[in-house]
Amino acid sequence: MPLSRQTLIRTLDRYGRECRPFFFLIGFDEELWKVQPLDELPDSIRYSIGGEEVHDHPLGIRSMEAPDYTKYRRKFDRVIEEIRRGNTYLFNLTLPTPIEPDASLEEIYEMANARYRLLYRGRFVSFSPESFVTIRGRRISTFPMKGTIDASIPDAVAKILSDPKELAEHTMIVDLLRNDLNTVASEVALQRFRYVEKIRAGEKELLQVSSEISGLLPGDWRERLGEILLSLLPAGSVTGTPKKKTVEIIKEIEGYERGFFTGVWGIFDGENLDSAVLIRYIEKNEDGYLFKSGGGITLDSDPRQEYEELLRKVYIP
């Protein structure tokens, strides 16, 4: 039986009030969650936060069963119809892809190049490049990530930054997250708009477009940590806008449970907080391995390009 949202909020508030370092993991629909003091964290939960460590490794995906394009197109067309009805303006459509990695989840965790790595109880591994929120002192910042292109494409940076569809999608997410921060912080401002970072993607490199938005939390934010975090969930970059209605449509159209995928995880060290969006995600179940991935859909999206972006994100960095 899923534990209640209020219990989650009270637990986060209590540890924040006590300034007790803890780990937290919250699923996409907030029904699945785990909060535990760092000094009680079991060996089956392992994490790494920090700068990307670039090193070569032999890991890869031995085989994958690409989602059927016809089925993807039907879901895509349903999303476009919802956009035309005005029920959503930006929609993050995801699908699971069955894969056969040439390494265990533990080996993938050890070797993957990523800013945020998490191995959870042998059930899934995430090697995410995307921060959810950071809190330093009273300053809270979020870094929406929208827009991906193969770095090997000639003039890749200019192409993605000049693409009208990518600009519209990114702008909508920035507006959504700026509004989200305004519910918990003051002096909210856009610090950087559409800066480009390079990330490893198996044997390739991708360019990822992000922005930075920040504001000031009240002085007692640690005592209200649960309320603050939950009011920002689910993460806008992996949901869409308007958020509440888009989540309802996601559950209707996607046809599978995201689970922890596109949720968030992070660490509170007693003073500050760092957290990540659970993307670049491999899940192990009784049938094998699933790599869950997706991308943002707008009215101007091309179905074939969106399908190919979903597949480009199936990699071990």
Image (spheres, rainbow, N blue to C red):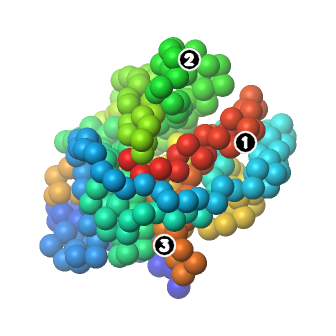
Residue 292 left/right relative to 200 = right
Label 3 or label 1, whichever lies nearer to me, is 3
Residue 82 shows in this picture? no
The answer to whether the residues at label 3 and label 1 have Cβ atoms under 8 Å apart is: no
Residue occupied by mark 2? 159
**Element marked by disc 3:** strand
**Is residue 120 placed above or below 298 in the rendered structure?**
below
Residue at the location (67% across, 66% down)?
Answer: 256
**Residue 245 percent location from the top left of the image:** 69, 51
Q: Amino acid at mark 2?
A: Lys
Residue at the location (56% across, 17% down)?
Answer: 159
Q: Which label's residue is closer to the chain start, 1 or 2?
A: 1
Residue occupied by mark 3? 284
Packing grade of label 1 (10 A; few <14, some 14-19, many >=20) is many
The answer for how far apart the CA atoms under marks 3 and 1 are is: 32 Å
Q: Amino acid at mark 1?
A: Thr
**Is residue 35 placed above or below 216 in the rendered structure?**
below
Residue 291 left/right relative to 249 = left
**Residue 152 percent location from the top left of the image:** 48, 25
Residue occupied by mark 1? 88
